[in-house]
């Protein structure tokens, strides 16, 4: 089994100071040390002779004689023409080397937004060396002013320009390249066609919609070097004796003509579908009091599904509109007797007929 932290993998190590000096802040001197802010975890390979598995050594040889050249006989040469060189000694170069003052000079303070990220090249943690108070004061002052500093210092016999900026209560030094070290975009001919392109408004709106669909908060922990992981997995499988067959996927043709609008629309649909499947996606639900019209129960169906108590109450309310049910024979005979008495009473006393007829209504 091949360990990820094995000899073929550069997993970094405990940080150690690579430069020490002082920040020159006006008349204030702040002792500091520089630590690398980046530990690249790359997979390193050695060159091996396939015939016997032995490691290949690189030798410094003379291009004309083919003989190995001792290191002491090697000098620096600047090519001014084809195979024509001007040699320069270390002593001659030392006369132009910047003074190793071990001072990180803060030349000016600017807004970070004024600096194009294309100038950044590597980063270092700037830690206090001895006394922490002046260091903390500088950090707090830069945070309050919302400014970064352009600094100059000498490291490894070369003068560097860098940006000193506060970050989470500490200072970070971002190395910068010089302006004349940038390759101008105007030197790249493919950019000439871009300015002449007329963008369709429908395509622009669709592209903006795609950007909105793919917009989210930046989470650096969600990005991994998948190539390194696959290479390490390959090495582990082969070291265990597994025979691995390489599957090479053909690259898409650059000459393929695509419908830009159709491709954008498909991309937007795919992005929305991916968002809807994400665990953090929220599903919109219809309010409970707004049922769809096609599912609304009919009044007759609702009446049939009512409980027995409600059915009885409903029947009682509608009783006056329905014919009176037939009474038993005993009750009918009693009612007839009461009617006969009532008729006799009417003949005897007409004025009391209304009072005597009330039993008929009660029997009903």
Image (tube, rainbow, N blue to C red):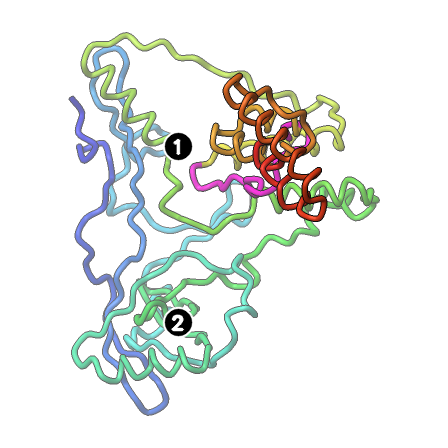
Residue depicted at x 36% and y 68%: 167
Image check: 239 left or right of 283?
left
Q: Relative to the observer, which residue lies in front, 239 or 206?
A: 206
The answer to whether any part of residue 20 appears in the image is yes
The answer to whether any part of residue 197 appears in the image is no
Please state the extent of the stretch shown in magenta in the rendering.
279-298
Image check: 261 left or right of 66?
right
Say which mark, if any, is on residue 153.
none
* Residue position for label 2: 164
Residue 349 inside the magenta-drawn segment: no
User: Which x, y percent locates residue 230?
Assistant: 34, 25
Residue depicted at x 47% and y 15%: 248
Q: Residue furthest bottom?
A: 27
Image check: 144 left or right of 45?
right
Q: Quadrant of residue 252?
A: top right
Dot 2: few (<14), some (14–19), or many (≥20) neighbours within 10 Å? many
Q: Quadrant of residue 25?
A: bottom left
User: Is 15 drawn above or below residue 213 in the view shown?
Assistant: below
Q: Nearer the viewer, mark 2 or mark 1?
A: 2
Image check: 196 left or right of 313?
right
User: Which x, y percent locates residue 313?
Assistant: 54, 35
Residue depicted at x 34% and y 50%: 75
* Residue position for label 1: 63
Q: Relative to the observer, which residue lies in front, 141 or 117?
A: 141
Residue depicted at x 39% and y 12%: 246
Quadrant holding the C terminus: top right
Classify mark 2: helix, strand or loop: strand
Classify mark 1: helix, strand or loop: loop
User: Which x, y percent locates residue 310?
Assistant: 51, 33
Q: Sequence order check: which comes first, mark 2 or mark 1? A: 1
């Amino acid at each position: 089994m091949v360990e990820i932290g094995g000899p073929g993998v550069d997993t970094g190590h405990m940080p150690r100071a690579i430069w020490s000096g002082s920040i020159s802040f006006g008349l204030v001197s702040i002792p500091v040390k520089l630590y690398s802010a980046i530990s690249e975890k790359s997979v390193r390979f050695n060159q091996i002779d396939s015939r016997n598995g032995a490691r290949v050594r690189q030798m410094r040889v003379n291009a004309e004689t083919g003989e190995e050249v001792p290191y002491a006989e090697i000098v620096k040469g600047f090519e001014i023409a084809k195979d024509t060189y001007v040699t320069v000694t270390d002593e001659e170069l030392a006369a132009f080397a910047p003074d190793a003052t071990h001072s990180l000079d803060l030349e000016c303070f600017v807004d970070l937004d004024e600096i194009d990220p294309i100038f950044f090249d590597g980063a270092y943690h700037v830690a206090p060396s001895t006394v922490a108070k002046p260091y903390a004061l500088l950090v707090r002052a830069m945070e309050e002013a919302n400014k970064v500093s352009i600094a100059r210092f000498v490291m490894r016999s070369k003068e560097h320009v860098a940006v000193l900026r506060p970050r989470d209560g500490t200072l970070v030094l971002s190395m910068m390249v010089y302006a004349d070290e940038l390759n101008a975009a105007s030197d790249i001919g493919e950019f000439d066609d871009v300015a002449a392109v007329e963008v369709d408004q429908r395509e622009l709106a669709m592209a903006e919609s795609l950007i909105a669909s793919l917009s989210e908060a930046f989470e650096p922990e969600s990005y991994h070097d998948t190539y390194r992981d696959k290479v390490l997995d390959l090495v582990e499988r082969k070291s265990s004796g597994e025979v691995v067959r390489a599957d090479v996927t053909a690259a898409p043709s650059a000459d393929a003509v695509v419908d830009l609008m159709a491709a954008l629309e498909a991309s937007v649909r795919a992005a929305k579908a991916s968002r809807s499947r994400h665990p953090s996606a929220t599903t919109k639900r219809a309010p409970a009091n707004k049922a769809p019209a096609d599912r609304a129960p009919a009044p007759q169906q609702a009446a049939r599904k009512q409980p027995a108590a409600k059915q009885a109450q409903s029947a009682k309310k509608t009783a006056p509109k329905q014919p009176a049910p037939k009474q038993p024979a005993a009750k009918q005979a009693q009612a007839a007797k009461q009617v006969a008495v009532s008729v006799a009473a009417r003949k005897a006393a007409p004025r009391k007929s209304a009072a005597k007829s009330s039993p008929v209504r009660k029997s009903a």
